[in-house]
Image (cartoon, rainbow, N blue to C red):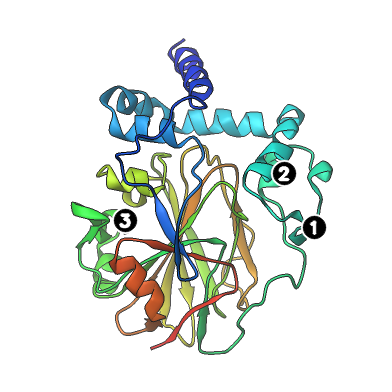
Amino acid sequence: MLKKFIVFILMVFLFMSNFIKSDSSRSNVCFYKGNELVQENIESEGLMRFFYGNSCGRFFRFFLSKKWFSSLVGSYYNTSFSKRSINAFVKKHNIDMSLFEKSEQEYKNFNDFFIRKLKPGVRDIDFSSNSLISPCDSKLLVLGNLQQNTEFFIKDSYFNLGRFFKNDYLAKKFEGGTLLIFRLAPYDYHRFHFPFDCIPGSIVKIDGKYDSVNPIAFKSGYQPLTENKRHLIMLDTDKFGEVAMVPVGAICVGKIVETFKENEKYEKGDEAGYFSFGGSTVVLIFEKGRVSIDSKFIDHSKAGYETQVLFGEKIGKVF
């Protein structure tokens, strides 16, 4: 009964979100697109600010971050009824469908569209042996010199290595290293790839909530990277040492699906997995002194801004 009540309330808020406008006095969420700072087109931004900046909204968010809610939303987007949302979504976010294997009309439901595949060869992948590429289409934020508690986005809000890994050995191993956060918005291509030649180990599943990974959530003082459901995958490489790759779920993301086989060798650019409906994140963590990230990403991150990157784009190199 409680779940039905919460779903009903959510439907009301989703309807109202079309009329909720962002307070112009608040800072907008911006990111760098090339060298230009642009405002992000956030799905239901007014609703997001309600859930993360209002005490009443935080009460409802407690229920919406539960697994059952994301599963419920995922079930809807797996129905043929959800197909009617595809065309409007493509137009709203100006998605270039010529890059993908199917047109809008060929997908059987919204989630089928959401996990769409790129056409072979449409992305220019940097295959230089010493380069690091972006594993996905996303907004990139870089944190260097990781400590057990590293300040994140706002003063007195911290990313905690121990809570992230839930493993004291790994927390110590990556202390002083580099953290790369690739945030995928709902309109992004939602498959992720290996950013270098590697051998992936076993998948360690870390249970958690399903909160938003948008900067609005971080700037409210919440840390979804250490609270949300995530999968820990250790990558063995010749060039970069041992690297942690962690796909992180988010609100309405019902599944993180890996498409690789454990302990087999993969080449840079090979597919590693995908996220079902919703925004999500891929985290890469390098040991100290293993990677050199291109200066523009570091400069933008120090100023508090993410940078748009595409799968295959060079973002750094071996240190």
Give the residue type at disc 1.
Glu
Mark nearer the viewer, 1 or 3: 1
Crowding at label 1, few (<14), some or many (≥20) Cα neighbours within 10 Å?
few
Mark yes or no: residue 227 visible: no
Give the foreground label among 2 and 3.
2
Q: Which mark is first along the chain, 2 or 1?
A: 1
Q: What element carries label 2?
A: helix
Along the line of sight, the residue nearer the viewer: 101 or 79: 101
Earlier-in-chain disc, 2 versus 3: 2
Whether residue 200 can be seen here: yes
Report the residue marked by disc 2: 112
Secondary structure beneath dot 3 equals: helix
Q: Which mark is residue 101?
A: 1
Residue 314: x and y in percent read: 53, 79
Circle 2 Cα neighbour tier, 10 Å, few/some/many (<14 / 14–19 / ≥20): some
Q: Is residue 146 toward the left or the right of residue 23 in the image?
A: left
The reply to whether dot 1 and dot 2 touch (C-beta < 8 Å) is no
Q: Is residue 51 left or right of residue 131?
A: left
Q: Identify the residue at image location x=24%, y=44%.
A: 221
Q: Position of residue 198 (x, y in %)?
A: 54, 78
Identify the residue at image location x=72%, y=44%.
112
Identify the residue position indicated by label 3 in the image. Answer: 164
